[in-house]
Image (spheres, grey):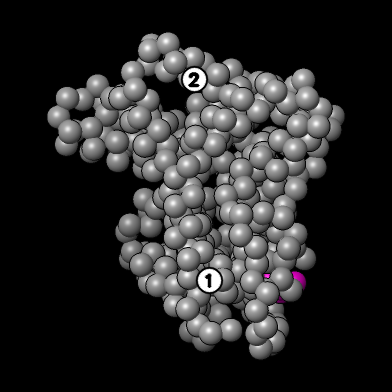
Amino acid sequence: MTTMTFARTNAATTPRVPIADDRAMLKAAAELTRDLNAPRPGVYWADFLASALVGYAALGVAIAAGPLWLTLVAGVVAMLALYRGMSFIHELTHVKHAALPGFRLGYNAFIGVPMLVPSFMYEGVHNLHHARTRYGTSEDPEYLPLALMKPWSLPVFVLIAALAPVALIFRYGVLSPLSVIIPGLRRVVVERYSALAINPQFRRRMPEGDAAKQWNRIEAACAIWAMSLIALVATGTMSLRAFAIVMVVASGVAVINQLRTLVAHLWENEGEAMTVTAQYLDSVNVPPPATLPALWAPVGLRYHALHHLLPGLPYHALGEAHRRLSAVLDKDSPYYKANYAGMPGLVAKIARSTMLPR
């Protein structure tokens, strides 16, 4: 769902000098990684299923636990594990489904429907973010010039994510069934409330053909689950304590994902089309030796800039690709300019930028 409601800044700024493509970097990225393009189904399934299993087991412990400390510890484990499982939605948009048979079904069965973040909320959306002429423009569903906005925009950007679980229950438990009998509402729900996007101007197209049939089946499952959850709480079958723990964990997943999104790019583009190198430099890698990014930027997301160079590379190959490129590219290559130490420095960088006069 769209998570931002404020508009882009209209402040006048000095025109930026376009960044030309660095041919040496692009050539090396393509040539050195050709043998890494095939996804390994065993890695995907083992990682995904383990994340879901640990997440739900820890959530069960958090609900059943007596001591507060155990509830808190188990809740954090559940949040991180389910966040990792949910992050596989990003891989679904890039990997050919024939290379990972049944993975979309598995994702929706174990994460997408239970967490009300089904695959269709990212498929058909995220690919637009990678379109050569759309990135960073008003047609990019996943871009806002956050570094050029007002200082208050950053905390709002993060805190609004905490409300995502409530919004998703309302979207699927109330709006989905209503939209079946109200055609006008159906279009609004699809266009405005069916995408993991941050650009409030973005509107989805209505699905057609087989895509529409698949969408409807998955959405029906989400609606049944959301309505069942509402009924379980309303009838007292699920205690308010258990429901509150589930919602807090889900809110934690949404907030950590929003924090990760906040530092995935530098957010400095004001709407013009960008070269591939410019898009890379506006994106962020947080490579080793940093260790915490493995938790807050899982499933290859710590190599987000590299991912924009090689969007078809499976997540498990990004670390090796980074090592190969780091070993051959000259130290003055722009490749190294997208590497950062961690989240605190990146947040501070964007925050300082919002405070500059424009």
Residue ID at (80%, 42%): 205
Residue ID at (42%, 68%): 347
In-image side of 191 versus 218 (left or right): right
Where does the image place residue 313, in percent across and percent down from the top left? 60, 54
The amino acid at mark 2 is Ile
Residue 26 among those drawn in magenta? no
The amino acid at mark 1 is Lys
Q: Report which residue position mark 1 lands on.
A: 150
Q: Identify whether 181 is placed above or below 353.
A: above
Residue 270 visible to the viewer: yes
Q: Magenta span: helix, strand or loop, mainly?
A: loop
Residue ID at (48%, 42%): 163
- Can you tell which quarter of the image residue 207 is in? top right
- What number of labels is visible? 2
Q: Identify whether 39 is placed above or below 260.
A: above
Q: Nearer the viewer, residue 167 or 301?
A: 167
Numbered range of the magenta stretch: 273-277
Where does the image place residue 358, in percent across and percent down from the top left? 58, 84
Q: Nearer the viewer, residue 180 or 320?
A: 180
| Label pair 1/2, CB-CB below 8 angstroms | no
* Mark 2 Cα shell of 10 Å, populated few (<14), some (14-19), many (≥20): some
Q: CA distance from mark 1 to mark 2?
A: 38 Å
Q: Identify whether 169 is placed above or below 296.
A: above
- Can you tell which quarter of the image residue 238 is in? top left
Where does the image place residue 131, in percent across and percent down from the top left? 74, 59
Q: Report which residue position mark 2 lands on.
A: 230
Q: Secondary structure at mark 1?
A: loop
Residue ID at (61%, 54%): 5
Q: Identify whether 5 is placed above or below 16.
A: above
